[in-house]
Image: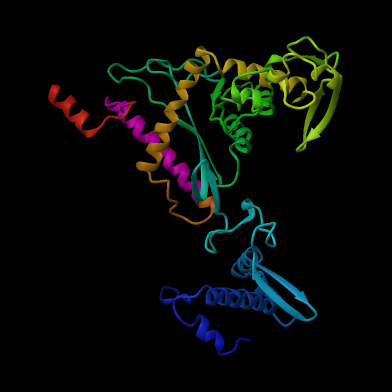
Amino acid sequence: MIDPSWQRVYGARIDDLHLPASQAGRRELMARYGTDGYFLLEQAHGPGAPGWLRELPAVQALRRIWIQQFYREVTGGRQEVRRREKLPGGDGLPPGRDCLISPYDLDARYSVKRDHGWGGYKVHFTETCDAPGAQAGASRDTGPAPAAGPGRGDRPNLLTGVATTEATVPDSAMLTPVHQQLEERHLLPGEHLAGSGYPSAELIIHAARVFGITLVSPLRLDNSTQARAGAGYDKAAFAFDFDARQATCPQGIASSAWTPCRQRQDEAIVVSWPATACAPCPARQLCTSSRRRQITIRPRELHEALASARTQQTSAQWKARYNARAGIEGTMRQATHVTGIRRARYLGLPKTQLEHNIAAAAINMIRMDAYWTGHPLDRTRSSHLARLDFTLTA
């Protein structure tokens, strides 16, 4: 099936491999790899090969990786194999959620969040966040928790849910599964503080309607030019009458068009004002730079949920309420520095998920042990020098 040239190309151990010094030599070697890989796949899927051969995980992985990395074009009995490059100059790359990053772990994916990239998985922790001195553990299902024992300090906050996914799964896609997981365990909270990547208007309504949960999470603000500049008429400055299907601008001019549509598979409404009213308007510079103003809003229920949430999250009371979520950052540090979950010890999503559950159980045991033995853990971190000073003072 192979000729002696394969020994020259692939005979050396990978740790003894030396790439050609020139770029032309490297491109030639890469094309050789691509061609040989497709040759192996042809043989494995050929009529003379046993059926079980193509079903081997290694062969399936090779096929996925080669489709991902190389583009094969057959014309007039001749084939050309070249490395895939992104559009528009190349042949296009598969979406990140489908890209394999390791032949040994087919579940691992590469993802980027803000300016940090990583390959592997993502874990979502749910934790109680009772304030110091509060009666932790109370819920609508179990009623008030028993009082803390004498001399034990504040009740510890515990992890109540763990969800592990591929790294490319967005946070918003996991909010409902997390709530379903908590409901199955009779651990649903009345109020859920979540990061800014989780909420949307749809999820706020769904959490309240289906699970009875008040979702407290900062929503993305209006990203219009006026809102970003902090000057002029942003969306909140307009009044929308959904019954009359009409909106009114801050100058008292009624809209001329109310057009339901779909944008990115979501229902939306485009509201427009007449150019004859916008062009001579004395406040035009505060409103729009085009001939007329157009605003896109969501259907009534979603629009009102967005407006209400955005208004609330600017208040001091809401900010003080949301400050409790800061505790999960300490939990994430404890998980990475104490249990070491930043680096997966096992291959595959199921084993990694088990690892994350064991890590969460270990954190809960550490916290409960500190509570039961009367040595509660510090809720805030302090440096070694500060702790030394505390010891000497005592």
Q: Residue 39, percent across and down?
A: 66, 78
Residue 19 visible in the picture? yes
**In the figure, residue 70 lies in which quadrant?**
bottom right
* Extreme residue in the bottom direction: 4
The relative height of residue 203 versus residue 320 in the rendered view (above or below) is below
Q: Residue at x 72, y 83 (%)?
A: 48
Is 372 on the left-hand or right-hand side of 294? left
Quadrant (top left/top right/bottom left/bottom right) for the C terminus: top left
177 or 291: nearer the viewer = 291
Residue 362 falls within the magenta-colored stretch: yes
Segment colored magenta: 352-378
342, above or below 315, in the image: below
Q: Position of residue 110 (x, y in %)?
A: 54, 52
Using residue 45 as the reference point, say whether residue 152 is left or right of it.
Answer: left
**Which residue, as the protein is rendered here, is positioned at the far left?**
392
In the rendered image, residue 209 lying in the magenta stretch gets the answer no
From the top left corner, tell me how far across and down residue 376 is, in percent: 30, 26
What secondary structure characterizes most of the magenta part? helix
Tell me where residue 311 appears, x and y as whole percent.
61, 16
Query: For this rendering, which residue is in front, 287 or 103?
Result: 287
Picture residue at 71% right of the left edge, 18% below the top: 304
Quarter of the rendering occupied by the N terminus? bottom right
Question: Can the viewer see residue 158 in this picture?
Answer: no
Residue 163 located left or right of residue 48: left
User: Of residues 286 and 258, which is closer to you in this image?
Assistant: 286
